[in-house]
Amino acid sequence: MTIYIKKPQINMKIKEIYNLAINKGIDADFRGREAVEKFLKRKREKYEQLPGKEKEEFDLESLENPYLDSRILNISQDKEIKRILVGVDVEPAEVLLAKEIGNIDLVISHHPLGKALAHLYEVMAMQCDILNQYGVPINVAEGLMKERISEVARGVNRINHQRTVDAAKILGFNLMCLHTVCDNLAARFLKDKIDKENNLIIIEDLINLLKEIEEYKTAAKLRAGPNIFVGNKENRCGKISLTEITGGTEGSPKIYEKMAIAGIGTIVGMHMEEEHKKEAEAANINVVIAGHMSSDSLGVNLFLDEL
Ligand SMILES: [Fe+2]
């Protein structure tokens, strides 16, 4: 858990902060604004054709917000926001922490909570477009992701998602979570940095480049810095992909073979499960894990800079 307290200079309403976040998330989105707008337009067209009863149950926010894992979860007092408590993970304990610190107008969690967590799987489809940009045929990406998306949807189903939201309601705290919007900012930042550097020959060069970034430099001191999960520091990077920084959570483990065929040599990711690691290894793809808390902190800090 990482906490940042923003100094009182913001003076924005909750909805304005949320709108800024969604907008910045779209600006940084690898698919580009036009593609995101087309995606929302298709959603609206489908919504308009729904029969009455289904229209009533429809999540209207999904017509404006392409990242349903980033939402306003509770407004207890719609006031000018001056002090925010921000955490990568917010649970009832952190809401109590906000109470203890005092004068906190808004709590922001990076990881999704409430219905944003229940909708985590919905952002995963964007991974198909990103994989496609890196050369994986769209039909292959969609075929493999479909299975994985339904697995994630079932996985989050059992969680008590409302717990922290209810704690915020009881204690009277405004609460918001910003997941994919911040991950998009981190992904864009890393992509721009890596693309600009034309001297990344071996994995060691890539690790050194990551360690120039403040969040990774700090994490390295805490033994949570960039790590090689597959490959070694002398391996050539080949084509470096940033397919695993944003898009909800880990994709399909079957994708690595297809990525290798598409010409990808190295993946930079936030975290990786054993099954995925084994498949990447079998496909001879190098994996550099930049670090979970550090990468999440990078995205959150980029958003706090915008604030
Ligand atoms: Fe995360």
Image (spheres, rainbow, N blue to C red):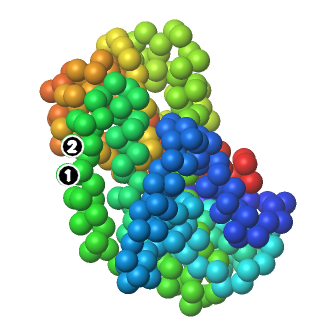
Relative to the observer, which residue lies in front, 183 or 297? 183
Spatial CA span between label 2 and label 1: 7 Å
Query: Disc 2 marks which residue?
Result: 143
Image coordinates of residue 103 in percent, x first then y, are 76, 77
Residue ID for mark 1: 147
Q: Is residue 138 left or right of residue 75?
A: left
Amino acid beneath label 1: Glu
Quick check: 13 left or right of 292?
right
237 versus 70 height, above or below? above
**Amino acid at the residue labelled 2:** Gly
Query: Is 123 drawn above or below residue 106 in the view shown?
Result: above
Mark 2 or 1, closer to the camera: 2
Q: Residue furthest bottom?
A: 170
Picture residue at 69% right of the left edge, 56% below the top: 20
Q: Give left or right: position of 242 versus 17.
A: left
Q: Quadrant of residue 252?
A: top left
* CB within 8 Å, label 2 to label 1: yes
**Position above or below: 204 against 188:** above
- For the point 52% across and 63% down, which residue is it? 63
- Depth check: 19 or 41 in front? 41
Q: Position of residue 203 (x, y in %)?
A: 39, 18
Which of these two is toward me, 244 or 201? 244
Q: Secondary structure at mark 1?
A: helix
- The quarter of the picture where the C terminus appears is bottom right
